[in-house]
Image (cartoon, grey):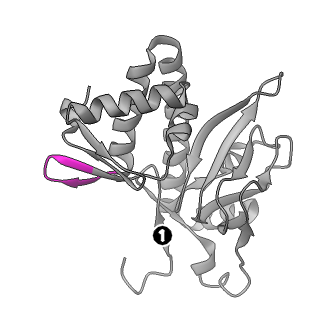
């Protein structure tokens, strides 16, 4: 990014860059981060949708609860990821919760009116944010289809490939993913169990299709990962 640019951008999970207001001229003097510890909620269902947020440090999960109180996790976000963006589509109250997963998590908030004003003056920013919204909706649709029509192994393999496509760094034929998800996280996001995730990943490792540790996943060849 050129030094003369008045915007500072994070890299987003959807491979776009989104604006963080604490580096915007005219806002940097008044803008502050919100700091959280593990287990804190950023917002609950039915609260007003009047802010957007970006993760500056740590992780945040978005989800909802069934009538019997079961938690359903929709996605897990990390540094640079935007959430609460449905406020831009006319959502008046939250349809999900946002909960912090790590201690020392910091989040960059922005009021809906402030964001709308910036988008009005920045067409490129507007296009990027609405592309992010569109991609999020498509991902949710794919996940629902996967849960209905695909078996557990396929869901896990496709999730790993999706992480590689979105977050991976190419090194020759290999793709390196800096992993921020535990096996339990992957299980929650694929509708499987932690034991099943561990079994499938160990199988893929034995076949030399992937290698992994707590910090990263290495996909040997995306085309061969099936």
Please tell me whether residue 205 is drawn above or below residue 11 in the rendered image: above
Residue 158 visible in this rendered orientation of the protein: yes
SS under mark 1: strand
Residue 157 visible in this rendered orientation of the protein: no
Position of residue 223 in the picture relative to residue 157 (left or right): left
Q: Quadrant of residue 81?
A: bottom right
Residue drawn at point x = 48 percent, y = 70 percent: 9
Q: Residue 107, position in %: x, y?
A: 66, 66
Q: Residue 57, position in %: x, y?
A: 58, 67
Using the image as rendered, state which of residue 152 and residue 200 is in the foreground: 200
Position of residue 38 in the picture relative to residue 187 (left or right): right
Range shown magenta? 168-175
Q: Main secondary structure of the magenta part?
A: strand
Q: Residues within 10 Å of mark 1 (few under 14, many from 20)?
A: some
Q: Residue 101, position in %: x, y?
A: 65, 53
Q: Quadrant of the N terminus?
A: bottom left
Which residue matches tag 1?
9
Residue positioned most to the top? 149
Using the image as rendered, state which of residue 156 and residue 116 is in the foreground: 156
Residue drawn at point x = 62 percent, y = 67 percent: 118
Residue drawn at point x = 48 percent, y = 54 percent: 128
Q: Quadrant of the C terminus?
A: top left
Residue drawn at point x = 75 percent, y = 58 percent: 51
């Amino acid at each position: 990014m050129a030094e003369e640019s008045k915007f500072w951008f994070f890299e987003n999970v959807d491979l776009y860059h989104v604006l963080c207001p604490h580096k915007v001229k005219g806002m940097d003097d008044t803008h502050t981060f919100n700091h959280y510890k593990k287990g804190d909620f950023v917002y609950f269902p039915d609260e007003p949708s009047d802010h957007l947020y970006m993760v500056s440090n740590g992780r945040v999960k978005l989800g909802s609860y069934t009538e019997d109180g079961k938690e359903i996790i929709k996605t897990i976000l990390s540094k640079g990821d935007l959430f609460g963006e449905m406020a831009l589509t006319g959502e008046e109250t939250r349809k999900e919760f946002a909960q912090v997963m790590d201690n020392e998590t910091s989040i960059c908030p922005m009021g809906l009116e402030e964001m709308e004003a910036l988008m009005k003056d920045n067409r490129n920013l507007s296009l990027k944010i609405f592309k992010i919204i569109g991609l999020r909706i498509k991902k949710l649709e794919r996940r629902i289809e996967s849960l209905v029509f695909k078996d557990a192994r396929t869901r896990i393999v496709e999730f790993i490939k999706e992480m590689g496509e979105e977050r991976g760094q190419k090194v020759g034929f290999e793709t390196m993913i800096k992993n921020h998800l535990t096996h339990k996280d992957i299980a929650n996001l694929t509708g499987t169990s932690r034991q099943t995730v561990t079994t499938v990943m160990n199988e893929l490792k034995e076949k030399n299709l992937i290698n992994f540790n707590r910090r990263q996943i290495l996909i040997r060849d995306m085309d061969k990962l099936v």
